[in-house]
Image (cartoon, rainbow, N blue to C red):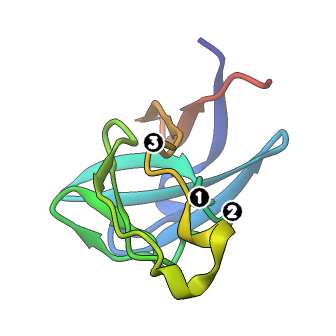
Amino acid sequence: MTWTKVLSADAIAPDKRQVVKVGKQNILLLYHEGQLFAVDNVCPHLKLSLKKGKIEKGAIVCPWHRSAFDLQTGDVKNWTPWPPVMGKVLGTISKEKTLKVFPARVEEGNIWVDIEEE
């Protein structure tokens, strides 16, 4: 594991979100039900930011196409396909793409994320 200190634990309030850059990766940090989560900040389908996505039943909902990803595993919990009128490319996006999640912890007053560079 490659743990990287990303910011001070008090830099993010329990009801807020913070995007941090670690190497080439933009990581979205958020708290849900008292637990810290670190996920890729982009939807794996559209490559657009998830920062404004709602949290519902332990999942983050993509604000762009409304699919939901499990915060623990990154698995698709609720797939919302694009309607056919959106075109061939958007209409055939695969639901098999999962959201990348990163182990995260708070230790010694800092938030640490385990990220391995590709």
- Give the amino acid at mark 1: His
Judging from the image, what secondary structure is the residue with disc 1 in?
Answer: loop
Task: Give the residue at mark 1.
Answer: 45
Element at badge 2?
A: loop
Q: Which mark is residue 2?
A: none
Q: Earlier in the sequence, mark 3 or mark 2?
A: 2
| Of residues 75 and 33, the one drawn nearer to the viewer in this rendering | 75
Which one is nearer the viewer's eye here, 78 or 20? 78
C-alpha distance separating marks 3 and 1: 9 Å
The residues tagged by marks 2 and 1 sit, at their Cα atoms, a distance apart of: 6 Å
Instruction: Check disc 2 and report the residue beneath it.
Output: 47
Q: Quadrant of residue 89?
A: bottom right
Q: Earlier in the sequence, mark 3 or mark 1?
A: 1
Q: Label 2 amino acid?
A: Lys
Name which residue lies at 45% across and 42% down: 96
Q: The C terminus lies in which quarter of the figure?
A: top right
**Disc 3 residue type (three-letter):** Glu
Q: Quadrant of residue 91?
A: bottom right
Q: 98 or 16, which lies in front?
A: 98
Residue lying farthest to the top in this orientation: 1
| Residue displayed at 59% across by 58% down | 45
Where disc 3 sits, the SS reads loop
| Mark carried by residue 96 | 3
Badges 2 and 1: C-beta atoms under 8 Å apart? yes
- Residue in view at x 40 percent, y 47 percent: 37
Give coordinates of residue 57: x percent, y percent.
15, 62
At label 3, counting other C-alpha atoms closer than 10 Å, the crowd grade (few under 14, some 14-19, many 20 or more) is few
